[in-house]
Amino acid sequence: MKKTLIIGATPNPSRYAYKAAHKLVQHGHAIINVGVKKGEVANHPIEKPVRVHDDIDTITLYVNPTNQKDLYQYILDTKPKRIIFNPGTENHELEEMAKKQNIETLEACTLVLLATNQY
């Protein structure tokens, strides 16, 4: 299974990051929620983007490109195998930075990837 860092995690059940957290857990993936809101999602706390995790397979983004800039170093220091840019989070600058560090990038929807067994 692919340990996944969800950037933009929120306790708001109407948001896609919330739905993705639950679906990832349902599919057996370990998750870490990172965001600015307090609370928990899928029985996992939401933490601030401070602690760099070194065992992440995938980062799935739910933060718009403008708000990603402050997270560039955090994302790259995590050294994931891949970054999924969900709809609305596409960011060619960050994609290029990731590719230079041999991090796979994918413009896709985490929910669709899970639903179609392509995650």
Image (cartoon, grey):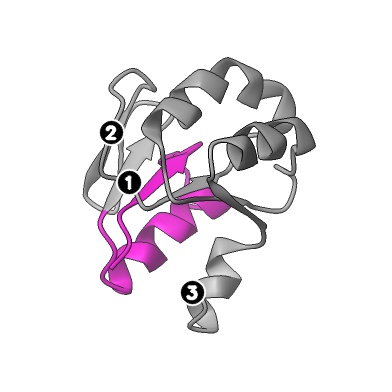
Viewer-nearest residue: 49 or 53: 53
Look at the image and tell me whether residue 36 can be seen: no
Q: Is the residue marked by circle 1 packed among few (<14), some (14-19), or many (20+) residues within 10 Å?
A: some
Mark 3 or 1, closer to the camera: 1
Q: Distance between the residues labelled 3 and 2?
A: 23 Å
Which of the two discs, 3 and 1, labels the residue nearer the N terminus? 1
Query: At which x and y percent is residue 23?
Result: 40, 67
Disc 3 designates what residue? 114
- Image position of 16 with respect to 74: above or below: below
Residue 56, disc: 1
Residue 53, disc: 2
Q: Is residue 20 magenta?
A: yes
Q: What element carries label 2?
A: loop
Residue 102 occupies which quadrant of the picture? top right
| Mark 1 and mark 2 residues within 8 Å of each other at the beta carbon | yes
Q: In this view, does 19 lie to the left or right of 90?
A: left
Q: In this view, does 51 lie to the left or right of 36?
A: left
- Image position of 28 with respect to 86: above or below: below
Look at the image and tell me whether residue 52 can be seen: yes
Q: Is mark 3 on a helix, strand or loop?
A: helix
Task: Please provide the residue range marked out in magenta.
Answer: 1-30
Q: How far apart are marks 3 and 1 (CA)?
A: 17 Å
Residue 26, disc: none
